[in-house]
Image (cartoon, rainbow, N blue to C red):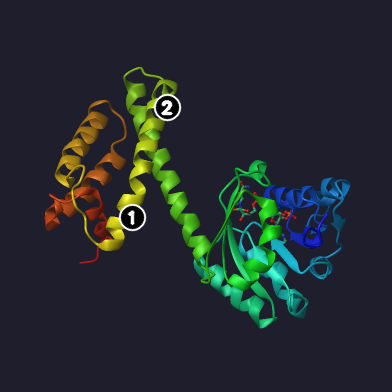
Amino acid sequence: MTKESRTPVTVLGLGLMGEALAGAFLRDGRPTTVWNRTAAKADRLAGQGAVRAGSALEAVGAAPLVVVCLTGYDAVREVLDPLGAALDGRVLVNLTSGTSAEARDTAARVARHGGAYLDGAIMTTPAAIGTPAAALLYSGPRSAFDLHEPALRSLGGATTYLGADHGLSALYDVGVLSLMWNILNGFLQGAALLGAAGVEAAAFAPVARNGVETVAGWLADYARQIDEGAHPATDSTLDTHVAAMDHLVHESESHGVDATLPRFIRELAGRAVAAGHGGEGYTALIEQFRKPSGRD
Ligand code: NAP
C-alpha cells in the first residue's frame, strides 16, 4: 500500500449514497471515519473497518479530506455551520445535490473558516459507486482537486474536474437531468402512442435505443454550431422538422394520447420558423431556449 493510498477520509452522512461512498473508500484501502445523525446507520460500515465518530466535529478532525452527502443544503448548513475552525486547512467535498447558488454560498462559508471547498455532482446510483461505471463531477479550486484526486478516484471510473467556479457541478448536473427527463418523456410519449396501436413497449425499446444513439452522435457537431452561432441545415431544415412535428401532434390527438408535449415541441419550433429560421438547421432553436418565455 502506497503512502498516498492511506490518505484518511471522513464521510458525513450515511444515507443510501453516503454509505456507498464510504464503502468505496474502505474497499480502496483508505482509512475512513464516518458520522451520521442517526448513529445506527454506521453499523455496517464499522463492521467493514470504518472508524465511527461520535460527532460531526470529531469526524472532521480525523481527516484532511471530508466528503459530505446529505439530503439537501439545509442539512449541509445545519451540520457544517457549528464546525467553525475545525474546517481550517481541510478540503471539504460536498456531493449533496443542490443549485449553483447554494454551492457558491457554501464555498464562501467554508472559506470563512479557512477550508477549501469542492462541489460535486454524482451522476450515478449508489450501486455503481466505486465501479468503472460511476461518473462524478467536481468544481472549485484546481489545487484542492489535484491534491485529493487519487482519493476521489476511489469513488468511480469517470472523475471529471469542470473548473474553478463552484457552481459548475450543479449546472452540469441539472443539464444532464434535463437531457434525461426529455429523453424519458419522449420514450413514454412513443410508448403510449404505440401502446394505443397495441404494440408493447418492449418492441419499441430497441428502436428507441437506436434513435437515442443516433441523436447522441449529433451532439458534438451541434455543440460547435451553437458555440459558433451558425446553424447550417446540413442534414434537415427546421421547416422539415416542423412538418414531422405536425405528424406527432396529429397522431397523438387521433389516438387519444396526451398531446401536451408534442404541441409544446411544435410551438417552440414554430416560434423559430416565425422568426425567419425555417431554412436553418435544428440548432437555430437555441434562441428559443435562451429567451425566457413571455419576454419580448
Ligand atoms: P438518503 O438516503 O435519504 O440520506 C440522507 C442523509 O442525509 C442521511 O444520512 C440523513 O441522516 C442525512 N440528513 C438529512 N437531514 C439531516 C440533518 N438535518 N442533519 C444531519 N443529517 C441529515 O439520501 P441519499 O440517497 O443518500 O442522497 C443524498 C444526496 O445524494 C442527495 O442530495 C441526493 O440528491 C444525492 N444523490 C443521490 C443519488 C441516489 O441515487 N441515491 C444519486 C445522485 C445524487 P439520517 O440517517 O439521520 O436521517
> In this view of the protein, which residue sits in the foreground, 279 or 230?
230
Q: Is residue 218 above or below residue 247?
A: below
Is residue 285 rendered to the left or right of residue 136? left
Res 133 → quadrant? top right
Looking at the rendered structure, the kind of residue marked 1 is Ala
Which residue was labeled with disc 2? 205
Mark on residue 83? none
Query: Residue 295 at what x, y percent from top left?
Result: 24, 66
* Residue 43: image location, x then y, percent: 85, 48
Which quadrant would the N terminus be assigned to in this image? Answer: bottom right
Q: Residue 286, relative to residue 192: is it above or below?
A: below
- Residue sitting at 16 percent across and 51 percent down? 280
Residue placed furthest toward the front: 2
Q: Residues within 10 Å of mark 2 (few under 14, many from 20)?
A: some
Q: Is residue 165 left or right of residue 212?
A: right
Badge 1: few (under 14), some or many (20 or more) residues near its Cα, within 10 Å? Answer: few
Camera-nearest label, 2 or 1: 1
Q: Which residue is mark 1?
A: 223
Residue at x 67% of width, y 52% of height: 155
Compared across the picture, whether 41 is left or right of 98 comes to right
The percent coordinates of residue 151 (x first, y second) are: 71, 59
- 35 or 157, which lies in front? 157
Q: Is residue 127 visible?
A: yes
> Taking the image as drawn, is residue 289 in sight?
no
Q: Say which residue appears at 47% left-offset and 61% top-offset.
A: 171
